[in-house]
Image: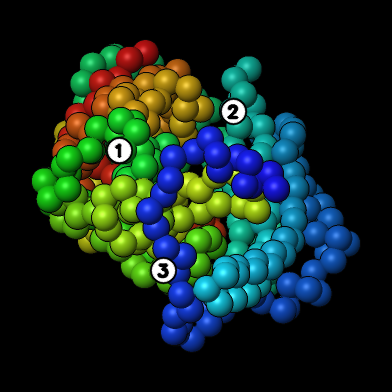
Amino acid sequence: KDALENSEYTAPIKTELPSPAQLGTPLETYNPDLENITAKSLLRACLDIEKNLLAESEIKNIPDLGAEVYNSKTILANSKGVFFENKSNGFGIGVGAIAERNGIKKMGWKSLSGRDFSVVSAEKIAIITANRARELLSPRKIKGGKFPVILSKRVSSSLLSTYLSSFYADSAQKGCSKLAGRVGEKIACENFSLFSDPLNPELPGSMQLDCECVPTAQLAVVQDGIFESFLYNLESASKENRRSTGHGVRGFSGHAGTSFMNAIVPLGTEYENQLFTRFPKCLFVTHLEGSSGCNAVSGEISIGAQGFWKEHGESYATDNLTISSNFFDLLQNIVGVGDEYSDSFSSVKVPALVISQMSVSV
């Protein structure tokens, strides 16, 4: 009754519900072994991490520490006869620790997630967390200006995530994407590509059907710098007499939306130390502080950062920085791509990105 009443206030949508489709082999998105991980198991892992961290030098406090195992079951059905069930699960464990030296305090974080709990090593997590807290403890000031910036694999995914809506067709149709009308144009450097990969069972965003019962498939959004396609759901596709690309998302209530199903930037060929040799001096960013200065519509980037200043082989920590640019300029200024991802179980996978120039203020 509510749905019918609400439909009186919306414009008609000329679209048809999908019919049943032949799908491939079901994705392995559920690990039954995780059913054996109890609350006691999680607590024991957390306490072991805490014990190992407190044994590390200069670690003063552990304000953040937690773990979880999650399970979900999705059922998709429509009046055309589609009926699809999918189970998925995973675990997450994360810690944040504070290190102190000469009155300066810094926070270090480490998280680990996936579907194989046997990879959890309290000792390794503690060492990485402690190192990340200590690495910025003796910061030095740098002069502001326009410099090459390397976004480490720790931060590149979170920055790109802020601007993914620019690639949604419904954003362009609402006037909220500067990419409107630019399909087929070169919008990035040739070494940058971006894919939606919904059929990789190793990533958490994988599904054989989107939330509107449309079969999913890998989609090249940007290929070698060329903008190949927006992401469409049923509604946005109907407005342009197109087919949905299988990127519709919605819950059991609320309106339809659009989303990547695993946003992937392919790996490059350069390992981290090679990236530093491109320039006589550059800023290597390992930590970003919030995103309040970032706007997905305009593309503006203004965000706090910490990291390392690299100059003629010398490297030292620096902080209290603000890096600024425009996302659409940044895509044009990518001159290098790293050869590995962070180890996070994330639906956005981006290696380190080398930006030829960003504004850095102190």
What residue sits 36% from the left and 42% below the top? 170
Identify the disc placed on residue 188: none
Name which residue type carries label 2.
Lys
What residue sits 57% from the left and 70% below the top? 79
Element under disc 2: strand
Q: Earlier in the sequence, mark 1 or mark 3?
A: 1
Q: Are marks 1 and 3 in contact (CB under 8 Å)?
A: no
Name which residue type carries label 3.
Thr
What residue sits 67% from the left and 37% below the top? 97
Mark 3 neighbour class, 10 Å CA radius: few under 14, some 14 to 19, many 20 or more: many
Identify the disc placed on residue 106: 2
Element under disc 3: loop
Q: Which of the 4 quarters of the picture holds residue 145?
A: top left
| Placement of 301 over or under 312, stated as above or below | above
Name which residue type carries label 1.
Ala
**One can see residue 328 in this view:** yes
Q: Which residue is mark 3?
A: 216
Mark 2 neighbour class, 10 Å CA radius: few under 14, some 14 to 19, many 20 or more: some
Q: How far is mark 2 from mark 3, CA to CA? A: 43 Å
Q: Which of the 4 quarters of the picture holds residue 85?
A: bottom right
In the rendered image, the residue lying farthest to the right is 40
Q: How far is mark 1 from mark 3, CA to CA? A: 21 Å
Residue 88 coordinates in the image, percent (x, y): 64, 69
Q: Nearer the viewer, residue 101 or 132?
A: 132
Q: Nearer the viewer, residue 333 or 306?
A: 333
Left or right for 304, reference 77: left
Left or right for 150, reference 38: left
Quarter of the image with the C terminus is top left
Residue 117 coordinates in the image, percent (x, y): 68, 69
Mark 1 neighbour class, 10 Å CA radius: few under 14, some 14 to 19, many 20 or more: some
Q: Which residue is mark 1?
A: 172
